[in-house]
Amino acid sequence: MANDLLVFIRRAWRNANRRISRAYLDLAASRTDQKLEKLGSQAHGWYAPPDLPQGARCYCIGVGLDASFDFALAERGAEVHAFDPTPTAIAYMERENAAGTVTFHPWGVLDRDTTMRLHYPMNADHGSYFIHDLHGTGKFHEVPCHRMSTIMKKLGHREVYLVKMDIEGSWYEAVPDMLASGIRPLYVQIEFDSPAPVWRVAPVLRALSANGYRMALRAGDNTVFKRTGG
């Protein structure tokens, strides 16, 4: 009973933070007029410009159990790299990526090269695992994580066109480190979730603004930024 109450309180706290952060994003972010189209499934799709260049290199960080956006980008001629160290995502990509249209890497993304604990959700078959023990399961496994700069060096990449981060809270560390490393994709897409208190959202938004990004779209927790500066 006590554990159930604690889980309920944590969930209510996260939901309140999410609503406050959404309002903050809408109030604080400067916007840019940019036509975008949703690709992938209705529940887990993300966004891309209609004129996506052939061969555009896209990093889709966080697969979960739905890589329909990743596959849709590849169908349009993009060079797609997907990243997720969770066992459910690895098994999913082994099943769904038989044609090899997406290059999959079983790594997480952080602001340091390390081995990280990922905590289990209440349902172990769920696609999302967390840096923080949000569901109070007390269970975790360790996974390899790298900085974006390390990943690009490992893959021999000098530029990336689009980065999507759906990484259950790790965006707070990964996005500022990416920008500080001089990595500035044309599009940065972030799910501000799990958890997303405004005191974490605000510095990330400031870092994006300082590097020439403006909000192109917000749909729930999912926010798209486009780099407008040089």
Image (cartoon, helix red, strand yellow):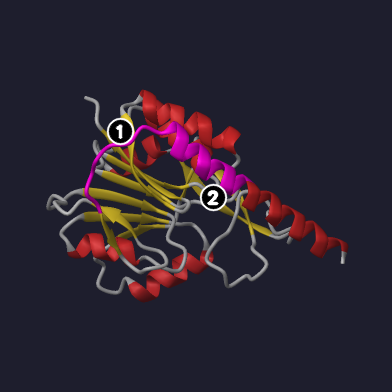
Residue 109 is left or right of residue 195, and the answer is left
Between residue 178 and residue 214, name the one nearer to us. 214
SS at badge 2: loop
Which amino acid does the dot numbered 1 rest on? Arg
Compared with 110, 181 (above or below) is above
Q: Residue at x 27, y 37 (%)?
A: 32
Which amino acid does the dot numbered 2 rest on? Asp
Q: Residue at x 69, y 56 (%)?
A: 11
Q: Which residues are magenta?
A: 17-36
* Residue 86 tag number: none
* Residue 193 tag number: 2
* Residue 184 tag number: 1
Compared with 106, 150 (above or below) is above
Residue 183, visible in the rendered structure: no
SS at badge 1: loop
Q: Which quadrant of the rendered structure holds the N terminus?
A: bottom right
Q: Residue at x 13, y 51 (%)?
A: 51
Q: Which quadrant of the rendered structure holds the C terminus?
A: top left
Q: Is residue 29 magenta?
A: yes
Local crowd size for mark 1, using a 10 Å CA cut-off: few (<14), some (14–19), many (≥20): many
Q: Position of residue 145 (x, y in %)?
A: 50, 46
Residue 91 is left or right of residue 19, and the answer is left
